[in-house]
Image: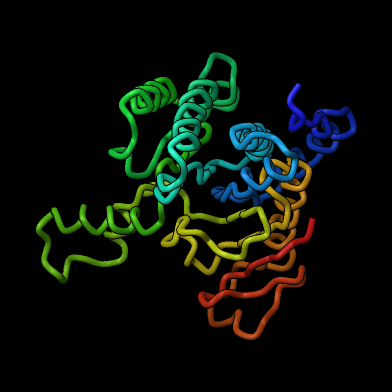
Amino acid sequence: MNNYNSSSDTSMPMIFLKNLFSKTIRTSNCVPKHVGFVMDGNRRYAKKKDIEIKEGHEAGFLSMSKILELCYESGVEITTVFAFSIENFKRSSKEVDHLMKLASDRIRQITEHGDLAEKYGIRVRVIGDLSLLPTDVLKDIELATEITKNNNRATLNICFPYTGREEIFHSVKTVLSQNLSGNEINEKLLDSNLYTSGLPPLDLLVRTSGVTRLSDFMLWQVINHDVTIELLDCLWPEFGPIRMGWILLKFVFNKSFTNVGSKTGEEYDGELNETNGVKDDNNQVLNKKKN
């Protein structure tokens, strides 16, 4: 057995606690509709555990599956995961090839009979510059999209390959191709041509690995002052559903009782979040948690 396959999240006490979290969150009126994840730290986890890089990425997929299950069980409608950055093509050809194969295998696994997509009624969307992908990967993406296109309980956006700058550039090119006058082009039009067009706005962004930057993920969507950002010191494969459960519970509590997120950007000036939060230049509440 690979030494990254921990059973800590599958023990009876953990299962009971996870179910308690999801039930409590689901019955509230403040469940985040759209949650984004920057799944960072797979390579550092591999180095930490003295395993191959590909095993670190596989461990990261296992963590993603557990986190997504908790989110959907808790009532989250949309999840968006940063699976592969366009910048990652600069890595070694061996690692890129493995990531492509892993992506194909896991996209198929998500859509297999009885697995994640069917169990939770998930529509799978792969967003980003798909022109950069090999033909065999594109075929698996097209199949997954076709199989899940009628699912309407929830949506999983897999950003692969993606950057926030490319998404904005894509929107601008699409708008310009419509030959509109300058007066007709506005923020609403640009927003409607993003990859996330038509979906609920981002409510919560979670990033692992102790890095305090967005790394070119959902740059347009995250500017909304209602977005809560959680920055965690643990590596992605170490991030489990129990920690995610606490984040969701805190989000629900803040929305229910302290009304965090209902203020305007100006009203955040000079404030600090009660959980050792800091603010970025756009008045986002950045909750730096140590785990």
Tell me the residue at 74%/41% (across/down).
240
Would you say 92 lies left or right of 248 here? left
- In terms of image quadrants, where is residue 140? top left
Q: Position of residue 258 (x, y in %)?
A: 72, 68
Which of the pair 135/286 is nearer the observer? 135
Q: Is residue 126 above or below residue 101?
A: below
Tell me the residue at 70%/71% (across/down).
277
Q: Is residue 288 above or below residue 205?
A: below
Would you say 119 lies left or right of 11 here? left
Q: Is residue 289 above or below residue 195?
A: below
Q: Quadrant of the C terminus?
A: bottom right
Which of the pair 136/277 is nearer the observer? 136
Count of picture labels: 0
Which of the pair 2/10 is nearer the observer? 2
Can residue 130 be spotted in the picture? yes
Q: Position of residue 269 (x, y in %)?
A: 60, 84
Would you say 111 lies left or right of 185 here? right
Can residue 69 be spotted in the picture? no
Tell me how the rendering is colored: rainbow
Q: Position of residue 50 (x, y in %)?
A: 73, 38
Which of the pair 3/111 is nearer the observer? 3
Q: Quadrant of the N terminus?
A: top right
- In terms of image quadrants, where is residue 66? top right
Furthest-right residue in this view: 13
Tell me the residue at 68%/59% (across/down).
210
Tell me the residue at 56%/62% (across/down).
227
Q: Position of residue 62 (x, y in %)?
A: 66, 32
Would you say 254 lies left or right of 81 here? right
Furthest-top residue in this view: 113
